[in-house]
Amino acid sequence: MAISTIDGIESIRILRAAGNLKITGGARAAIEIETHTAPRVTTNAGVAEVTLRDNGSVSVPAGVTVEVEDLAGNLDVAELATPLVVTRVRGNLHARRIGAISMRDTVGGNVTIKEAGAIDGLKVRGSLSVESAGAITFSHISGGFDCRAIDGEVAIEKIAGGANLLGVHAPFIARVIGGHLEIEDAAHVEAGVVGGRVRAANLSGGLQIGKIGGKLAADGVAGEVAVGFVGGNARISRVAGSLNLEDVGGAVELAGPFPLDKAWSVASRGRVNLEVDASASLELDASAGWGRIRTYGIDAAALKWLGRNHVHGSVGAEPAAGART
């Protein structure tokens, strides 16, 4: 093994590495490069430009910024407090305990990041997994997306696979998700299209999705729920804001508590089941098309029937403050 030492450097730029590359930060006085074949190094005004002809390991002092332009293999980065800039990695990328990381072009494999600052990138051909980080911004993820314990906003243009999020403390925004969306203990959710099912639980904000190819389950949403189309069934419970399901292909189940002064609107091609508790106060207008409306176990005296498939009126006691749902 050959070890090369570089002193007095503020930034190191890996122009090309022919194999795998490991980068580690720490309390050392100079940059150390360990390879089988001696690297090609040029320095100018505090910047070192390095070309590696095989696998390599680079140790950098605290405060030295790192940039990797072209890597043929896998990249492993750890203990790096300064920002990391990556242009192209043909293998996998694994990073832990680092500052901000920016992926300007394409990562050919999977990306795994743990304990990082802000993360942004253009394209990952594999999956992206992030745990304990700041904001995340990406254009295209060809595989699945998994993240947890994220402090900042998560904005992804396109996720070809599924998305699984836990503990996202700022809004999650996506234009297209090809697979399922599972999100729990999060803030606000906005998505254009979700190809599979959606399950959202314990959101401090709202849930807004244009189109869902599969089922929808929303439980414990503090804000508004608004969905243009649901291909399968929909199950809604513990929603504190307004509700608008414009077109549901399957059955719908609605459960309270029902918030006062809010409007709930649902259109379904299947059966709609509304479960009313003793404290509910509703202003109801229901039309069943070719079907039938039935009531069980409630006081229906205030309901006015316009045929067997249309009913209008109130359910429950008059609220002490505010209007009925």
Image (tube, helix red, strand yellow):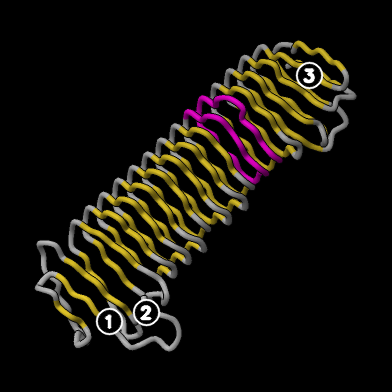
User: What's under tag 3, amino acid-wise?
Assistant: Ile
In the rendered image, which residue does mark 3 sit on?
3
Q: Which residue is mark 2?
A: 324
Q: Amino acid at mark 2?
A: Arg
- Tell me where residue 229 appears, x and y as whole percent: 30, 50
Locate residue 226, reporting x and y percent. 39, 57
Examine the structure image and report whether residue 258 is included in the region drawn in magenta: no
266 over 228 or under it: above or below: below
Corner quadrant of residue 56: top right
Do the CB atoms of the residues marked 3 and 2 lie less than 8 Å apart? no
Q: CA distance from mark 3 to mark 1?
A: 81 Å
Residue 104 lies in the magenta stretch: yes
Q: Is residue 14 above or below residue 228?
A: above
Identify the residue under disc 1. 314
Tell me which residue sits at (86%, 24%) in the image: 9
| Residue found 40% across the figure and 71% down from its top | 262
Label 3 vs 1, first from the N-terminus: 3
Q: CA distance from mark 3 to mark 2?
A: 75 Å
As shown in the figure, which amino acid type bears the numbered disc 1? Answer: Ser
Q: Earlier in the sequence, mark 2 or mark 1?
A: 1
Which quadrant of the structure image shows residue 45? top right
Residue at 56% x, 43% y: name it.
130
| Mark 3: secondary structure | strand
Q: Secondary structure at mark 2?
A: loop
State the extent of the magenta-drawn residues as a range. Answer: 99-125
Answer left or right for 22 relative to 227. Answer: right
Does the CB distance between marks 2 and 1 fall below 8 Å? yes
